[in-house]
Image (tube, rainbow, N blue to C red):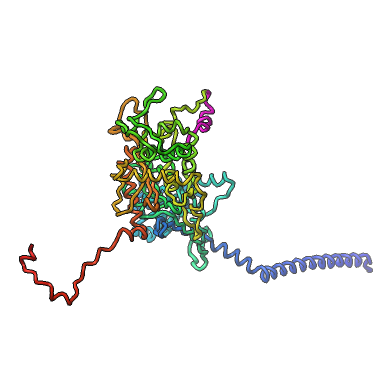
Amino acid sequence: MTQPAIFFAEVNERQGLFHRRAILLGAFAGIGISALGARLAYLQLFETQRYEKLATSNQFNFKLAPAPRGVIVDRNGAVLAANRPNFRLMVARDKGMDTEATLKTLASFVPLDDARQRRLLKDIHNAPKRAPVPVMEDMSWEQFSAINVRAPELPGVTADVGEVRVYPHGGAFAHVIGYVAKVNKDDIDAIGKAGGVPDPIMLHPGFRIGKQGVEKALDAELRGRPGAHKVEVDANGREVGHDVDGDIPAVPGDEVQLTLDVDIQNRALEVFGEESGGAVMMDCRTGDILCMSSAPSFDANRFVRGLTGAEYRALSGYERKPLLDKCLTGLYPPGSTFKTMTALAVLMAGIDPEARVSCGGGMNFGGRYFHCHKRGGHGSQNLHDAIKNSCDTYFYSMSLRVGPDRIAQAARAFGLGQTFDIGIPGQKKGIVPDPAWKKRYFSKNEAQQPWWPGENLSYAIGQGYLQVNCLQLAVMTARLANREYKALNPRLIKSVGGKERPRGSDAPDLPFPREHIDRVRAGMAAVTDQSQGGTAWRASQLGLGNILMAGKTGTAQVRNYDSGGSRGKGGTWGLRDHGLFVAFAPIDQPRYAIAVIVQHGMGGSTAAAPRAREIMRTALLKDPELISGIQKPLPMPEIIPDTELDTVPAVSNVERTI
């Protein structure tokens, strides 16, 4: 039987379609395999290093490490702020960890009361996962060892060694140097408001930021550049090892050298004792600040570790304000120390310095009697006598002839009423009043206040609206004493990272004739001269041979005594007068100028001058050029030649006894 031809045609057609499809699929498969092979070859041959790095990054992490903070030293290299090892305990929240139980376990090794545990529990839960939260600083070696031995039993707990800031001299430099503390939310917010981005190191539990004084002003220079530790981690991100060779070393912060002298600063705090006030000493030749001490002070080391609420309340609530910098922030009426400026105004007004005013204990003006501090009066006084005796009546009378504008001009030329670029914040400008200032001050008041002539009298003796700080008084005195008659500027930061800062002696001349300044100096020399009977001669004797000190006392009242009272004597401490003293030495070759304010210390000659004398003695006895003139060798005894010994008659026992 014959088969239909169409059958073979259909078979052939199907086979051809199959073969075409097989070839097409094979081609696609070949292309895919070739592409995959090419990709694998590319990854193996050309991308090896990249993927090795990615694999390593999954195995290792880098933990930021703060750099050693820069050291702060005094003018002679004595350390004022440094770093020391610190055993610290930290806890990080991790998956499946019972944080509360962990803290209770730790409490058996380190002191953690219930209140402290509750605060830590909140901090740990608010922190990012596996971010360490400091639990305790300055652990003892026994505590550190006990926790490290039990580390496998305490997941999330780390006890390691870091660095902590230390201030060897406690409170002597607390206000100047300041202190460091943990970064808080306000610090982060302040950077954000300024348009910056917080440095990641600021979130590190061991990092500290400057909070006051030099530590704050030069924080960027002192903090250095952080490094990193290379650590091996498991699949959950837990640290299981440390690759020391892979660490990135940190760059330590710059060394900061101050112009302060550690011995003078310590002596200043010592002589204040329990009193409240400030002392600033300057080099009359360079403008360098040798001492800037505020009393009472506080231990900056306590702020580094962290104060309790009770400790902070005790410091802030104490009436003598240990947290207040009396040298820069505290403002006081200068009292009679300001009469040096009034004297310059008198001379600039063309008034004869030999013109005399009769002092009978005060003067009447505007229906009011203005007392002199000496009730019986000083008698006839010229300019020199008025400075020596601190005669209020003389300056009352002259202020009416001089006027407030000339007095203000002299005060501002000598540094009062201004701030200085000494490298740290916190200065208050104070007030040097004049009619224009008073008009501005009362501009918002509907009843405008003109400058009354009677205000001249209070102004002339350093009272009224006048407000200054201790640094300004030291600058005023240094400018008076400077032999080059320069408008010296104070300098506190000597160098940063070995680069010296501009000197304070690079300043213009004072806008006063030299003979006028010399007359004021002569009056200040008479204040401390025993032969002339100045107001401070008893309290200002240095006891250093022919090295003498010139100065000016001041007693500034803090309230009106028309209703009774005697300058606050025997009354409440906060209502007593302030005692002030400004001085320079030696008189013939001025080197050091000092200003001392004893808050509510009563008299300048009784409270401030003796303290200024002791601080000045310390500076003078450290000066190698001056000490050589004080410590003169004893004369050698006469030596009898050997040839003459036989000619000397023998001395009997009786004669020897006589």
Can you see residue 132?
A: no
102 or 89, which is in the foreground? 89
220 or 303, which is in the foreground? 220
> x and y percent of residue 268 in the render?
34, 49
> x and y percent of residue 17 in the render?
86, 65
**Residue at 47% from the left image edge and 27% from the top image edge:** 452
Magenta span contains residue 429: no
Q: Residue furthest left?
A: 654
> x and y percent of residue 311 in the render?
36, 43
Query: If the image is split into quadrants, where does the N terminus sit?
Result: bottom right
Q: Which residues are magenta?
A: 432-446
Query: If the image is split into quadrants, where does the C terminus sit?
Result: bottom left
124 or 236, which is in the foreground? 124
Q: Quadrant of residue 43?
A: bottom right
141 or 92, which is in the foreground? 141
Can you see residue 394?
A: yes
